[in-house]
Image (tube, rainbow, N blue to C red):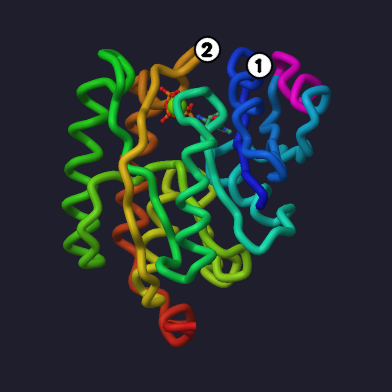
Amino acid sequence: MDVVLPCLDEAEALPWVLERIPDGWRAVVVDNGSTDGSAELARSLGATVVREERRGFGAACHAGLTAATADIVCFCDCDASLDPADLVPFVREVDSGTADLVLGRRRPTARGAWPAHARAGNLVLARMLRRRTGFRLHDLGPLRAARREALLALELTDRRSGYPLQMVVRAADAGWRVAEHEVPYLPRAGTSKVTGTWRGTWHAVRDMRRVLAEPPAAAVREGAGQ
Ligand SMILES: Nc1nc2c(ncn2[C@@H]2O[C@H](COP(=O)(O)OP(=O)(O)OP(=O)(O)O)[C@@H](O)[C@H]2O)c(=O)[nH]1
Ligand SMILES: [Mg+2]
């Protein structure tokens, strides 16, 4: 199993995150131009490090997916807000064929883990997603697992905050079975970059709206049920 960990200045969180990668799995840390020594630290802790010059959450995730070689690929934020060990049952589900994509529904464990505006925004997004896809999801959680080749076949184009949403929308168009399970959401280590800032939140909303406005990807839809 390969776990893709998008990473922009997460030196504070890396030891905790990498220590929790299940035995026998490979951590693929995608360094997105960190200046705090994240890449060197990740390498010294045994992770495979991929460098992606182009900024953006989607750019980092996609570079990790492209570099991955395992049949099943997982994604996990690299800020210690999510425990990669929680991916074990997700992978089992994908492996057994019960689901094509498994998503973690974030359940905050402490006050401040998930600011109110982010939670409210996510709720609105989940409702829009339900209208667009029919999926009854509650969150667009960054903890996820799916088959590598199927993910690549979705031909995702967003390279910023819309990437996780585009993955779900295109999965819906391709007829995937998507499952959602609750996972604890911890207060992140280090400084907040997106959710905790107005600028980051605004960019995320803009990217997501763009994805929802896209017409269904016909080519992807034709490949449904594979
Ligand atoms: N924001 C941002 N995060 C990136 C980028 N490239 C990689 N990442 C990583 O993507 C993961 C998710 O980003 P976060 O900054 O945690 O986004 P968030 O969880 O919405 O918000 P905060 O945790 O409050 O910052 C983290 O591991 C980041 O280090 C990038 O260009 N921008
Ligand atoms: Mg975070």
In-front residue for pair 207/139: 139
Measured in 3D between alpha carbons, the distance from the residue under mark 1 to the one under mark 2, in whole angstroms, is 8 Å
On the picture, is 143 further left or further right than 1? left
- Residue that carries the numbered disc 2 in the rendered image: 190
The quarter of the picture showing ligand 2: top left
Kindly tell me whether residue 163 is visible in this rendering.
no
Looking at the rendered structure, the secondary structure element under dot 2 is loop
- Residue that carries the numbered disc 1 in the rendered image: 11
Q: Which residue appears at 44% of the width and 41% of the height?
A: 142
Q: Which residue appears at 75% of the width and 26% of the height?
A: 42
Relative vertical location of residue 129 with respect to residue 174 in this rendering, above or below: above
Pointer 1: residues within 10 angstroms few (<14), some, or many (20+)?
Answer: many
Q: Quadrant of residue 27?
A: top right
**Residue 48: where, in percent of width, then height?**
78, 38
Q: Quadrant of residue 30?
A: top right
Q: Main secondary structure of the magenta part?
A: helix
In-front residue for pair 136/91: 91
Relative vertical location of residue 177 with respect to residue 52 in this rendering, above or below: below
Relative vertical location of residue 221 with respect to residue 96 in this rendering, above or below: below
- Callout 2 amino acid: Gly
Q: Which residue appears at 78% of the width and 24% of the height?
A: 45
Pointer 2: residues within 10 angstroms few (<14), some, or many (20+)?
Answer: few
Kindly tell me whether residue 122 is visible in this rendering.
yes
**Residue 114: where, in percent of width, then height?**
30, 23
Taking the magenta stretch, the answer to whether it contains residue 209 is no
Q: Residue furthest bottom?
A: 222
**Residue 51: where, in percent of width, then height?**
76, 38
Give yes or no for contact between labels 1 and 2 (Cβ–Cβ under 8 Å): yes
Q: What span is in magenta?
A: 35-42
**Residue 24: where, in percent of width, then height?**
72, 44
Looking at the rendered structure, the secondary structure element under dot 1 is loop
On the picture, is 173 further left or further right than 147? left
